[in-house]
Image: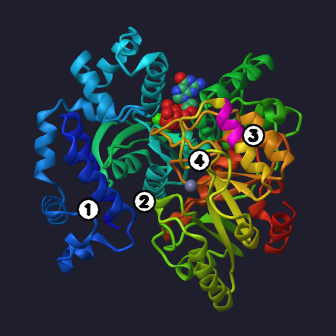
Amino acid sequence: MMNKKVAQILNEIADLLEVKGEDFKPRAYRKAARKIASMKGDITVYHEEGTLREIEGVGKAIEGKIEEMIETGSIEYLEELKEELPSGLIEVMGVPDIGPKSAKKLYEELEVVDLDTLKEEAESGNIRELKGFGEKTESKILKGIEMLEDISGRHLLDEVIPVAEKLIGYLEPKAERIEKAGSLRRWRETIGDIDILATGDSDELMDAFTLYEDVEEVIVKGETKTSVRLRGGIQADLRVVDEDSFGSALQYFTGAKEHNVPLRQIAIDRGYKLNEYGLFKKKDDEKIAGRVEEEIYQKLGLKWIPPELRENRGEIEAAGQDELPELLGWNEIKGDLQAHSDWSDGHNTVFQVAEEAQNRGYEYIALTDHSQSLTVAGGLSREEMMEREKEIEKVNEELEINVLSGIEVDIKKDGSLDMDPKTLEGLDIVLGAIHSNFRMDEEQQTERIKKAFKTGLIDIFAHPTGRKIGEREGYEFNIMEIIKCAKENDVILEINASPQRLDLDSLNARNAKEQGVLISLGTDAHGLNHLDYMRYGVATARRAWLESKDVVNTRSYDDLIKILRGG
Ligand code: DGT
Ligand code: CA
Ligand code: CA
Ligand code: ZN
């Protein structure tokens, strides 16, 4: 839907107007943006029917902007505003904790015009001197810049995976063997570039690669390695190797570097030499492995290590002692435990979501619409929940799949829940989540979450840290304490599979598992295609060393219900 895009542009205009020092106009733009983002009707339909002015907050001026946006894809007024101000200020406002007001102040008083100047001023301690900023804000700004630098030049999984799969699908018929390598094969949460490894006729493969329809620029073309930039800015490397080095090259180029370094040391300790061409005896260079990846590990006295574990987080020791986990399988998930319908901010009806889940072979799906205090997401009152209940009952009769009637209930500032206990007890599944008051200090935030767990009403704590990759760090709380509290109160922790969240991340999810806490996977789908995100959740679970038994979605419907009733 166009609503989000329009709302985003209106907010951008509001930001720039605010930086310019305007007071009332930005508020008007924000109000209209909020309304458009949360309303159920499609903005383009309003446009076609000429009823834009009927939307609350849309006056003549804003109506004109929306029309221009829908008809031409851009707004001249926005372009003009951008030209009036340093272009880097938009970047500056991308730093968490810097809104238009702070950006204006930093610009006027410290001549901050982009991220570089912002960093300089923060590092030299000038920001803390500004009225209303202080030391804490300054250090938060530095942390925010660091986060943006970490993500800079990197891409989220859902940007890369489909692109890589299409590319590999295109090359496959021309290759004898072809495999993903690098961070892509390890399913890291962000990807720097796509690495592909192949065997076959190098000339033919490299030609095909450079002629691929989505190639924008050939960076370097060679016989063994070619790099291109694809449309959308992602870089891809294709390496063509000899057949009897394919396994060792795959091992080498899968990485991570941190995994390869100790592995090479093990080789040396055993009197070998390991590189991308193979495993060799040190004394006479005799090649003892290289064709198959498993053989490399085997000759080093190790079990084969799944790529998702290759981060030097104890996997090499575990492989030596035959103590690697039996990782959660890619096809073991029997249902999705977080999805939204059009009762709140999802785009589809209960029936549509359920039918799509059924077509994907799921045994169950949980519809977890928001509770009322999340007004921006069309949260539901008790009465609306009751209405929705009837619809879910009907769909349960019509379809094979089991639709769980659920909620993503807001945990309020004081740790109480945004729905009465009786209603919550009547639901099949209750997800608790934090969507407000991110800025409480660590101790208060931890207490807030604990208090919510102790109500005994929450089955699953959704997107536990609140982070969004490249956008914000999440709220401050003591995660180990919360993991323990989850264990004590039988609360399941979620791996939210939405590629911008992946929350819990693999390290925290592994901690949870080690404390005996169950994990659930949920895509947080707001549209049918978002159900695809489950694979990113499974990947994160695998990177967290999780096994089938650690994940509730591997249970049959009956067993799941037993866990939810008991918890
Ligand atoms: P990325 O692309 O930043 O998401 O991460 P990777 O892991 O895909 O890194 P990339 O593309 O630079 O290199 C692919 C793999 O090749 C990497 O995981 C390990 C291997 N590799 C590359 N350069 C080196 C190196 O200098 N030493 C070692 N040991 N391995 C390397
Ligand atoms: Ca890479
Ligand atoms: Ca690369
Ligand atoms: Zn949520």
| Separation of marks 4 and 1 at Cα, in angstroms | 35 Å
Q: Position of residue 151 (x, y in %)?
A: 45, 34
Q: What residue is disc 1 on?
A: 57
| Dot 2 or dot 1, earlier in sequence | 1
Q: Amino acid at mark 4?
A: Leu
Write the residue at 82% across / 36% down: 319
Q: Amino acid at mark 3?
A: Ile
- The dot on residue 482 is 3
Residue span colored magenta: 443-448
| Separation of marks 2 and 4 at Cα, in angstroms | 29 Å
Helix, strand or loop at mark 4: loop
> Which-is-in-front pick, marks 3 and 4?
3
| Dot 3 or dot 2, earlier in sequence | 2
> Which quadrant of the structure image shows residue 98?
top left
Q: What residue is disc 2 on?
A: 170
> Which-is-in-front pick, marks 4 and 1?
1
- The dot on residue 191 is none
Q: What residue is disc 4 on?
A: 502
Q: Position of residue 122 (x, y in %)?
A: 39, 15
| Dot 1 or dot 3, earlier in sequence | 1
Q: Using the rendered image of the protein, determine whether residue 292 is visible from the camera's viewpoint.
A: no
Disc 3 and disc 4 in contact, CB within 8 angstroms: no
Write the residue at 83% across / 40% down: 514
> Which quadrant of the structure image shows residue 15?
top left
